[in-house]
Image: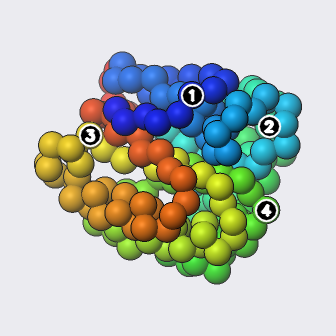
Amino acid sequence: MEATSVGPQMRVDLGSTTALSCWQIMSNSHNSPVAPHDAETYLITGATGDVGSKVVHQLLELGHRPRVFARDAAKARLQFGQSVDIFVGDLADKKLLAAALDGAHALFLITTGPRIPVLDQIAADAAKATGIRHIVKLSSLDVEQHLAIGAWHEHGEAAIRASGIPFTFVRPALVPWRGTKS
């Protein structure tokens, strides 16, 4: 797993594969530790999925009110109640994503499937246009091994690098999806 930041800790248990220090990564977007009570705003994509929901719950436990970007508002509201700000849209819609990012400090980006490079490019462009200070992308160890979906994530990472926004790529060896046994 590639990690580049240090600071306050937030552990997100991704099952038997690894623990991700998302709070540490996201809160260090301006190169200094941020206490949980500071007014940082985080947008989490993929928030109703397995990994994204764990990130949201950890932020909530630390006293934050994260933003979630979801296709299904009812599903997000059922999962998180009134404790999050929900923005409805699809990552392919730069205008809706930019509206969700406006005023936020950091983006936790989860993309899947063959459209990863395109969606990551859209996210990087929207993040740059709205002044996001840090992007954390859930990638894959396959980037380093040149396997399977690694090529998609590699192109997505390139788009984020090219944006000039400070970034962290999290590359777990395996991301457990719903229904998998850990």
| Residue 163 visible in image | yes
| Residue 92 position within the rendered picture, expressed as x and y whole percent measured from the top left | 50, 75
Which label lies toward us, 2 or 4?
4
Tag 4 residue:
103
Q: Quadrant of the C terminus?
A: top left
Which label lies toward us, 1 or 2?
1
Q: Earlier in the sequence, mark 1 or mark 3?
A: 1
Task: Please tell me whether mark 3 sits on a helix, a strand or a loop.
Answer: loop
Farthest residue in the front direction?
A: 31
Which image quadrant for residue 72? bottom right
**Cα distance between the residues tagged 2 and 3:** 29 Å
Q: Earlier in the sequence, mark 2 or mark 4?
A: 2
**Cα distance between the residues tagged 1 and 2:** 19 Å
> How many numbered marks appear?
4
How packed is label 4: few (under 14 Cα within 10 Å), some, or many (20 or more)? Answer: some
Residue 6 has which mark? Answer: 1
Q: Earlier in the sequence, mark 2 or mark 3?
A: 2
Tag 2 residue:
64
Tag 3 residue:
141
Task: Please tell me whether mark 4 sits on a helix, a strand or a loop.
Answer: loop
Q: Identify whether 42 is placed above or below 22.
A: below
How packed is label 3: few (under 14 Cα within 10 Å), some, or many (20 or more)? Answer: some
Q: Earlier in the sequence, mark 1 or mark 2?
A: 1
Q: Quadrant of the N terminus?
A: top left
